[in-house]
Image (cartoon, grey):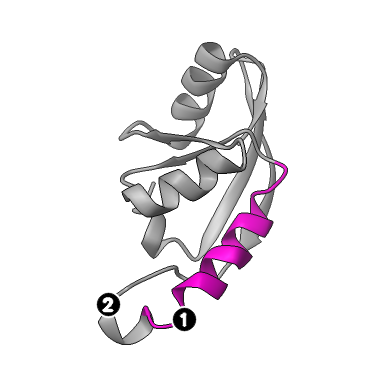
């Protein structure tokens, strides 16, 4: 429910398209919140990629092209949504079969 670059935590869900089961919360450093904090964005991105490495998709309000390309290169789909988290997870799972988000 945030812009990808502003997220300091990722909620991990499992869904079959009918239910959304919360699994855990994973803390990360924000990817980018301004010019001053973006100098080390590659190591931050590596840490975020590691945090979601076992997921099939990442849901966010917005996500930039660079993070999208890096996630897609690892086989992780990116989905932008304004829905409630649980509803968005179920909708994403219906479209992509059973996924960990």
Residue at x 61%, y 56% (from the top left corner): 49
- Residue extending farthest left: 35
- Determine whether 50 is above or below 74 in the image: below
Magenta span contains residue 12: no
Residue 74 x, y percent position in the rendering: 62, 42
Residue at x 66%, y 39% (from the top left corner): 55
Query: Where is mark 2, residue-wise?
Result: 34
Residue 70 x, y percent position in the rendering: 50, 49
Q: How far apart are marks 1 and 2 (CA)?
A: 12 Å
Q: How crowded is mark 1: few (under 14 residues within 10 Å), some or many (20 or more)?
A: few
Magenta span contains residue 39: yes
Residue at x 57%, y 19% (from the top left corner): 93
Which mark is nearer the camera, 1 or 2? Answer: 1
* Secondary-structure class at tag 1: loop
Query: Where is mark 1, residue-wise?
Result: 40
Seen from the viewer's position, the closer of residues 82 and 29 is 29
Q: Quadrant of residue 43?
A: bottom right
Q: In which quarter of the image is the C terminus?
A: top right
Please report the bounds of the magenta region as a residue range: 38-54
- Determine whether 47 is above or below 58 in the image: below
């Amino acid at each position: 429910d945030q812009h990808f670059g502003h997220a300091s935590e990722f909620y991990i869900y499992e869904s079959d398209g009918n239910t959304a089961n919360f699994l855990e919360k994973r803390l990360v450093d924000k990817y980018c919140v301004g010019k001053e904090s973006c100098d080390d964005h590659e190591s931050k991105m590596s840490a975020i990629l590691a945090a979601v490495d076992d997921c099939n998709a990442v849901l966010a309000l917005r996500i930039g092209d660079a993070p999208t390309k890096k996630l897609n290169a690892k086989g992780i789909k990116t989905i932008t949504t304004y829905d409630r988290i649980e509803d968005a997870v179920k909708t994403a799972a219906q479209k992509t079969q059973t996924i960990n988000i």
